[in-house]
Image (cartoon, rainbow, N blue to C red):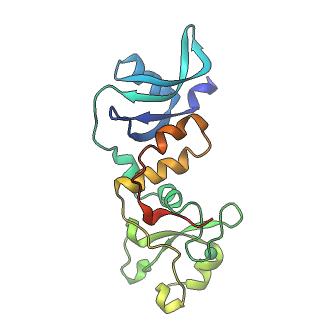
Amino acid sequence: MGVLKRTVLQLNASYEPMSVISARRALTLITKGVALVQVATGIQVYPGIYLPSVIRLRNYRSYPRRMQQVTRKNIFLRDGFRCMYCGARSPKVMLELEHIVPRCRGGKNVWENLVAGCHECNQKKRDRTPEEAGMTLIHRPLPQTIHTSSHILKQMGAEVKEWQTYLWQDSDGDRRYQYVN
Ligand SMILES: [Zn+2]
């Protein structure tokens, strides 16, 4: 069923947003009694069972590892799908994963050394540091923290209206992460 591929926002028992999961996974958690439906959609999956849009865990869990992984997608989400050198946004430009300190110079695959960069800026920078290339980063890339995860979730859920109350309830979000639009 196509609807089972839809995404569901998973909240911790504390109402803190945790991750975005598939509807199939959400229904499993509900069936097992691990989670409760917080917000349901009008879509009926089985007689009397509505597809959830937001679920909440019955018991508190520590933070999911998945959100902490250094992946291309997580880096792009953190950087708001913008080139961190010129500010151009995807899909206007093709974004690539950019090592601030190049790999050949010992730069590591870590949150602090990776940013989204457009093809043009990457070509210009080549195997140099930003200083050597005379380029400036728009934002210092932040390491993974609970705030980064929160920021990533906000980016993932930006289009889903009924998630906003839950995604934006922690108003003490990382202020270093305010993007200029
Ligand atoms: Zn660029």
Q: Which sits in the foreground, 20 or 14?
A: 14
98 lies above or below 10: below
Q: In this view of the protein, can residue 50 be seen by the observer? A: yes
Q: Quadrant of residue 147?
A: bottom left
Q: Horizontally, is 40 left or right of 10 in the view?
A: right
Q: Quadrant of residue 59?
A: top left
Q: Horizontally, is 63 left or right of 158 in the view?
A: left
Residue at image x 54%, y 86%? Answer: 135
The image position of residue 27, as x and y in percent, is: 46, 22
Q: Quadrant for ligand 1?
A: bottom right
143 lies above or below 125: above
Q: Quadrant of residue 106?
A: bottom left
The image position of residue 125, as x and y in percent, is: 56, 84
Q: Which sits in the foreground, 166 or 68?
A: 166
92 lies above or below 136: above
The image position of residue 138, as x and y in percent, is: 53, 75
The image position of residue 175, as x and y in percent, is: 43, 62
Name the residue furthest front.
171
Q: Which sits in the foreground, 28 or 173?
A: 173
Residue at image x 52%, y 56%? Answer: 77
18 lies above or below 86: above
